[in-house]
Image (cartoon, helix red, strand yellow):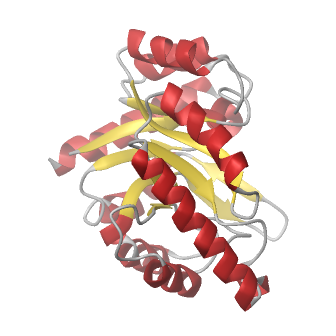
Amino acid sequence: MLKSGLVSITFRNKTVKEICALCEKAHLSAIEWGGDIHVPPKGNKAKETLEMTRDHGLSVSSYGSYFCLGEGLDAFQYNLDEALKLESPIIRIWGGKKDSKDFTEDERKYAVDELMRASEIAHGAGVQVALEYHPFSLTDDRESVKKLLKETEGEPFSPMFYWQPRWDWGEAESLKALGEVQSRLSHVHIFKWEHTENAIIRKPLEEGASLIKRAMNIKKDGYMLIEFVKDDLDEMLLKDAETLNLLISGRE
């Protein structure tokens, strides 16, 4: 079953309480709490955040950490500790800090080894590691992701993958990328952006409805999480949440 949610970094300027209240008003099901502002590692906000989330009838879909491969397992553990305090089933991490083509063979091997060790540690604590499909990392293009799928397959703790549409890809290319990670897909970040020569322009989610509906034929359960809204407005989240919930209900 598909459910709707919000990535908390959509509103970095809001408090945890404000985000929970807005998500409840928008009839969303869950929140991915970000590790940069709302629930930073080695902080003291996770337990209170979990309580507020539940008090508003919401679930924690995931912990959006900012751990990047290459930072070491001690840094990963700090982030995992926050995910555990949030009782989050998934911790999002990033596949390094540079384009996949710029990794040497040895650097890539080291990153994959670290990824597998981190995934095993998290698995032992009941948490699933998921890599976000993101520029400037090992998940920045389809070929690198397909290679990474093979490099990390075959273990009960093998990492999962987030997916999100690339603003510089068309609908067909985006759906191919989604299909390629279907067997190891965790959550989906959704938004509608247009890429111009000088800027990325955020649009109402309803303008991306075609892609989302087709994505739902591939992503059939779990969470679809709204990430960023036009003009950072509460009203746009309410409108985008209505769009997403209607698309989900129309599929069932």
Q: Quadrant of residue 126?
A: top left
Vertical comparison of 107 with 178: above or below: below
Classify the position of the N terminus by image quarter: top left
Q: Position of residue 13 (x, y in %)?
A: 74, 24
Q: Quadrant of residue 72?
A: bottom right
Vertical comparison of 54 with 185: above or below: above
The residue located at (19%, 51%) in the rendering is 251
Q: Position of residue 98 (x, y in %)?
A: 78, 72
**Residue 132 appears in view:** no
Q: Position of residue 46 (x, y in %)?
A: 58, 22
Q: Quadrant of residue 70?
A: bottom right
Is 96 left, or right, of 221 in this rendering? right
Q: Position of residue 89 (x, y in %)?
A: 40, 40
- 237 or 128, nearer to the observer: 128
Residue furthest out toward the right: 198
The residue located at (39%, 15%) in the rendering is 54
**Residue 72 appears in view:** yes
- 192 or 164, nearer to the observer: 164
Residue furthest out toward the left: 252
The residue located at (51%, 86%) in the rendering is 147
